[in-house]
Image (cartoon, rainbow, N blue to C red):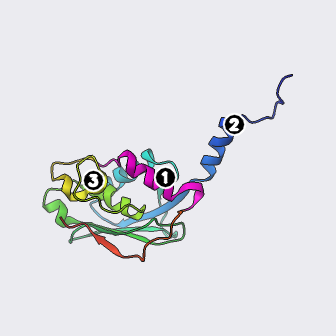
Amino acid sequence: MAPAANAVSAPDTVAAKSASAVVTLRYDDSQARGWETAIAAGVASWNTNVDNVKLTKAQPGTRTEIQIVATTGWPQATIGPVKPGGRGRVELGSQAVDQGYDKTRIAAHEIGHNLGLPDTKPGPCSQLMSGSTGGTSCKNAVPDAAEQARVERFYANGAASRTPADGHLVVDAS
């Protein structure tokens, strides 16, 4: 007996469920002049490497979950995971760039904090969240498998699955 024409196979059901469970977080980088390329690359790295959360640039005048600004200090960010309707902040400090650190790695690392990841210092260049301990020659802006898996768990089933920290800022000084 042939299956019904409108039957949905199991893989299609899983794909539909996954697509509907994606958390979208909007970011505003209008106050991050000079960092636009690095932010776009850092966002692309996260969007390429995790499925449960997607970062999208907000249209002017719309509500955002993540505010990205350029500062003269050391990079820092609030610890998440930021939830839809929540507030996260990323400060992309030029002090680290002046010391020779890669802008794209900095942007991806700080966004990682908003997605719920702490620093893993000291750590190798292969760990995005090792931050400055990867050294100034480190250009890796891609989260490793463990970092990807943690973010996937935080945003499983369409929402951040743990309560965000108290909004404290993590300063990524070496």
What amino acid is labelled 1 in the image? Answer: Glu
Rendering coords of residue 91 (x, y %): 30, 69
Report, in whole angstroms, how far the alpha carbon at label 3 lies from the one at label 1.
Answer: 20 Å
Image: 129 above or below 71: above
Residue 83 position in % (x across, y down)? 51, 66
Residue assigned mark 3: 105
Three-letter amino acid code of the residue under disc 3: Arg
Dot 2 crowding, Cα within 10 Å, few <14, some 14–19, many 20+:
few
Q: Secondary structure at mark 2?
A: helix
**Identity of the residue furthest to the right in this view:** 1
Q: Which residue is mark 1?
A: 152
Q: Is residue 137 above or below residue 66?
A: above
* Label 1: element kind: helix
Residue 58 lies, in percent from the top left, at 48, 62
Instruction: Find the distance from the CA under tag 3 to the CA under tag 2.
Output: 38 Å
| Quarter of the image that includes the C terminus | bottom left
Q: Rate crowding at label 3 as few (under 14), some (14 to 19) or many (20 or more) other CA atoms within 10 Å.
A: many
Q: Are marks 1 and 2 in contact (CB under 8 Å)?
A: no
Residue range in magenta is 141-159
At horizontal 21% and vertical 53% (from top left) the residue drawn is 102
Amino acid type shown at disc 2: Ala
The residue indicated by pointer 2 is 10
Location of residue 132 by image quarter: bottom left
50 is within the stretch colored magenta? no
Q: Are marks 3 and 1 in contact (CB under 8 Å)?
A: no
Tell me the quarter of the image containing the N terminus: top right
N-terminal of the pair, mark 3 or mark 1, is 3
Q: Residue at x 46, y 72 (%)?
A: 87
